[in-house]
């Protein structure tokens, strides 16, 4: 079984402060991990995926297999970063298909 | 914007009635998904379909049914057997039938169902 844990329901930081949204996973195989974001009144959308190893909107996330973590980080938070963030894991679910499992989400609030 | 559309945005039904939520996509994606989003629960998979005329149960399929008669459409019926149907429902699609672990899922705007 695959599981994604986001320990913080709400994270408040001041503008300009560093941000770290935590994500831990449980999966027996080699995982593919994603961060999705949902801004107010907008659709849920992909922010970044670990396989791309890229920085999107200043956010980065590194897969740490030893700690089974995929924390999302940004050095300087901006007000427009305020949103709901979901960590997700794509794992093999049988019959040649993969299933995306989401964490419960962390609401990031950036204080001006 | 196009992509994935869900209708209606808000839906109210009386307890005991079945209700069908619409999901349409013009992305030519093979795979489609239905999730339920509850506060503090994240997204939970109800049903998914990798190809037309085929679908599989997700983690919380009880009380729901789906059909996939056309590639672009994946309606979800919330039946009277669903014990707690009031929720926000999200439809998504991805380019292929889930045979790759790298597939991005594209989401619709959601339907908020309230059962009175």
Image (cartoon, rainbow, N blue to C red):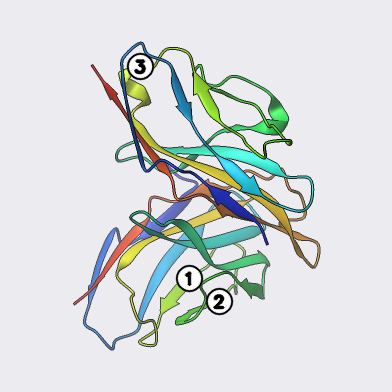
Check the residue under mark 3 and report the chain it is in.
A
SS state under label 2? loop
SS state under label 1? loop
Q: Residue at x 51, y 49 (%)?
A: A103
What x and y, as percent, mark residue A72?
A: 53, 28
> Circle 3 is placed at which residue position?
A78
Distance from Cα at disc 1 to Cα at disc 2:
6 Å
Check the residue under mark 2 and report the chain it is in.
B
Q: Are marks 1 and 2 in contact (CB under 8 Å)?
A: yes
Q: Is residue A21 above or below residue B105?
A: above
What x and y, as percent, mark residue A17?
A: 37, 13
* Labels 3 and 1 share a subunit: no
Mark 1 or mark 2: whose residue is earlier in sequence: 2
B88 and A64: which is toward the camera: A64
Check the residue under mark 1 and report the chain it is in.
B
A82 and B96: which is toward the camera: A82
Mark 1 nearby-residue class (10 Å; few <14, some 14–19, many ≥20): some
Callout in the foreground (2, 3): 3
**Quadrant occupied by the N terminus of chain B:** top left
Residue B95 visible, this orientation: no
SS state under label 3? loop
* Labels 1 and 2 share a subunit: yes
What x and y, as percent, mark residue B41?
A: 41, 57
Q: Are marks 2 and 3 in contact (CB under 8 Å)?
A: no
Callout in the foreground (3, 1): 3
Q: Is residue A4 left or right of residue A85?
A: right
Q: Is residue A47 left or right of residue A13?
A: right
What x and y, as percent, mark residue B81?
A: 39, 87
Quadrant location of residue A67?
Answer: top right
> Circle 1 is placed at which residue position?
B75
> Circle 2 is placed at which residue position?
B67
Q: Is residue B45 above or below residue A69?
A: below
């Amino acid at each position: 079984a695959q599981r994604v844990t986001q320990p913080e329901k709400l994270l408040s930081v001041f503008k300009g402060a560093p941000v770290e949204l935590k994500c831990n996973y449980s999966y027996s195989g080699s995982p593919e991990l994603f961060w999705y974001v949902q801004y107010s009144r907008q659709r849920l959308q992909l922010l970044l995926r670990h396989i791309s190893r890229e920085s999107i909107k200043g956010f980065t996330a590194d897969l740490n297999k030893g700690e089974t973590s995929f924390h999302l980080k940004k050095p300087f938070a901006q007000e427009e970063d305020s949103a709901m963030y979901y960590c997700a894991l794509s794992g093999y679910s049988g019959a040649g298909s993969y299933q995306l499992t989401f964490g419960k989400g962390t609401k990031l609030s950036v204080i001006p | 914007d196009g992509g994935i559309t869900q209708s209606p945005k808000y839906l109210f039904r009386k307890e005991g009635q079945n209700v069908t939520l619409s999901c349409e996509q013009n992305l030519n994606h093979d795979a489609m998904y239905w999730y339920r989003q509850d506060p503090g629960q994240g997204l939970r998979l109800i049903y998914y379909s990798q190809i037309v005329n085929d679908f599989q149960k997700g983690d919380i399929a009880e009380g729901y049914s789906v059909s996939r008669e056309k590639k672009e459409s994946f309606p979800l019926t919330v039946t009277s057997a669903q014990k707690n149907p009031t929720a926000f429902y999200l439809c998504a699609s991805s380019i292929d039938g889930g045979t790759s672990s790298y597939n991005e899922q594209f989401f619709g705007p959601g339907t908020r169902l309230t059962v009175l």
